[in-house]
Amino acid sequence: MSRPLEILGDDTAPACEDGVCEIPAAPVNQD
Amino acid sequence: MTATVKVDIWSDVACPWCFIGKRRFETAADEFRAAGGEVEVEYHSFELSPDTPVDYEGSHSEFLSKHKGIPTEHASQMLAQMTELGKTVGIAYDYDALHTTNTVRAHQVLHLAKSHGKQLEMKERLLAAYFEEGRHVGQIDELADLAAEVGLDRVEVLEALKTDRFLDDVMADKAQATSYGIDGVPFFVLDGKFGISGAQEPATFVDALQQAATAVA
């Protein structure tokens, strides 16, 4: 087991997991 | 600042957030270097969907629909959304042309490329080929062609893929990811101490690089 990592950054940043990627439902760059 | 930060990145080729995260991280790394820092990057294998067949029959919308349990139309809307997000960092996602496939061979090519000091070029080539150019990154011949484009020996690539020469390296990366508790990608490990999950904004990466550079060993 590796030593635990100190987690930095925004824990809501988008990522992909188990073949599925978080994709926002709402359009971006809206007026 | 003269510190060198080693950044190990777990990533899959078939991962749109990994491509966007790569762009955002590169922006941050450029800023960090401009301030006098150094960054050394190494990519590691992570298979998001290891059960995907090499020749998946169906559109990527259908693939996503089955994985998420949502209507195909909804999946298509999500891919359109990701396409718009890609444009914000200069990526031209083309999901109509994309060949959904298994990525374990592509990961083996990345390990072979690393052994020749060409991993970063290979990673970029594979992501662009898969997401922007409709290339089939699960087929051996196609992978050999792409590897040759970054200066690798096509015959060596074919031999390595036919014998699974780098499969153990792929599995070792996956085991290391499990050891770190990584269950999603992209995931960035800085100097083996700090972890950052997801396609963070460049400013967040810059802060993390600065923190790693000044951390007491």
Image: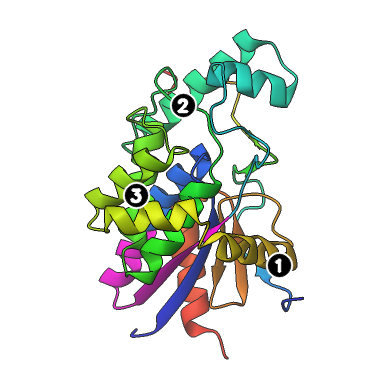
Note whether residue B170 is visible.
Answer: yes
Q: Amino acid at mark 1?
A: Tyr
**Between residues A24 and B69, which one lies in front from this camera angle?**
B69
Give the residue pinned by disc 3: B124
Which residue does the numbered mark 2 point to in the structure image? B99
Residue at position x 36%, y 40% from top?
A: B141
Q: Quadrant of the C terminus of chain A?
A: top left
Q: Is residue B142 above or below residue B148?
A: above
Q: Disc 2 on helix, strand or loop?
A: loop
Q: Secondary structure at mark 1?
A: helix
Residue at the image point whose x is 31% and y is 51% from the top: B147
Mark 3 vs mark 1: which is more N-terminal? 3
Q: Which residue is mark 1?
A: B180
Q: How far is disc 2 from disc 1 in space, using C-alphas?
A: 31 Å
Q: Nearer the viewer, residue B121 or B34?
A: B121
* Frontmost residue, B100 versus A15: B100
Which residue lies at the image location 52% right of the left edge and 22% below the top edge? B79
Q: Position of residue B106 (x, y in %)?
A: 46, 48
Is residue B34 rendered magenta in the image?
yes
Quarter that holds the N terminus of chain A: bottom right
Q: Is B27 positioned to the left or the right of B42 in the image?
A: left
- For the image shown, how many numbered marks are present on the structure? 3
Other-residue count near label 3 (Cα within 10 Å), few / some / many at <14 / 14–19 / ≥20: some
Q: Residues within 10 Å of mark 1 (few under 14, many from 20)?
A: some
Q: Which amino acid, by three-letter code, is at mark 3? A: Glu
Determine the CA span between mark 3 and mark 1. 25 Å
- Letter of the chain that mark 2 sits on in the rendering: B
Which of the 4 image quarters holds residue B35?
Answer: bottom left
Q: Position of residue B39 (x, y in %)?
A: 38, 73
x and y percentages locating residue B80 in the rendered image: 48, 19
- Foreground mark, 2 or 1? 2
